[in-house]
Amino acid sequence: MTAKPEDGSALRLSDFKAERARLLRLAYRMLGSVSEAEDIVQEAWLRWCDVPGGVDSPAAYLTRIVTRLCLDQLKSARARRETYVGAWLPDPLVGTTERDEALADDVTLTLMLAMERLSPLERAAFLLHDVFDTPLPEIAAALGREPAAVRQLASRARRHVQSAGPRFALQPKEAEEISRAFFAAAASGDAKALSALLTEDVAIHADGGGKVLAFRNVVRGLERALRLFEGLKRKHVDLPRFIRPIMVDGLPGYVSIERGEVLQTTALELREGRITAIYIVRNPDKLRHVQEALGLF
């Protein structure tokens, strides 16, 4: 029995829907941008519609399309980041939307940042091999490399990022307690409380993208961090507002409205129970999905 054209279209749509969440997750992990990942997956759909005839493995074919689109996108993304104002951080995934849930996996924010040091091919090989469990021949086809070369790419990438895994898991209650304690100490500029929470080598990263006020360089060391929070308290009478605790790509944190009515996500990296890195996203372009989900402004 010959399938009707509309039956083929329906099957093609069904195949794409079955893979869409995984493709979106792959694109986000490659690019660190929710909006760019959605654009990539939309482009993959358009290309998928134009593929003539049947495809033996839709999952493998779509993975190849998305991977190659992401590799092309990374070339321009890296050029843009060279002129990016201040620190660049990935879009925060805070679990507030179905989209965030679709993107969620075991990849942490610290691993995302470590992957920024990889070449595009190393990043693709590592993600496909170690995170998405893609068979080696499929990765080789997606990257246009021999399987042995892909294995070397993934191995080299793994060595570069092996120290970026989570140091220990936190229970939700513990994560919320640490987040609330840090927010209160930072908002009040309480040096004693902050000293008890932060490590001596704490590093504070803030991504404003030139759109809102944010310090451009990473603030390193406890003394500089204490001066920063004391200075913010001294300069501003109005206090920030804690909206809700969140997990940002595996790290405890929170959403807040900061001084000047600026939406912000804060993620906290821990070492031996104390905060060793703080990742602040204030760029409104990276927080639209958070703002929308929480009904803010």
Image (cartoon, grey):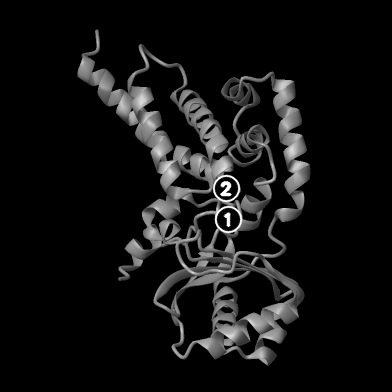
Tell me what residue is drawn at x 68 percent, y 78 percent.
Answer: 225
Q: Quadrant of the C terminus?
A: bottom left
Residue 45 place in picture, x, y as percent: 36, 30
CB-based contact (under 8 Å), mark 1 and mark 2: yes
Q: Quadrant of residue 127?
A: top right
Q: Earlier in the sequence, mark 1 or mark 2?
A: 2
Q: Tell me where residue 223 sits by quadrant.
A: bottom right
Q: Quarter of the image for the N terminus: give it.
A: top left
Residue 66 shows in this picture: yes
Give the mark count.
2
Give 197 or 73, whichever is nearer the viewer. 73
Name the side, left or right, on which 293 lies relative to 84.
left
Q: Is residue 122 above or below residue 222?
A: above
Could you tell whether 57 is left or right of 8 in the image?
right
Q: Sort mark 2 into few (<14), some (14-19) or many (20+) by Cα contacts within 10 Å.
A: few
In the displayed structure image, the side of residue 229 where residue 95 appears, left or right: left
The amino acid beneath tag 2 is Arg
Q: Is residue 227 above or below residue 115?
A: below
Location of mark 2 (residue): 81
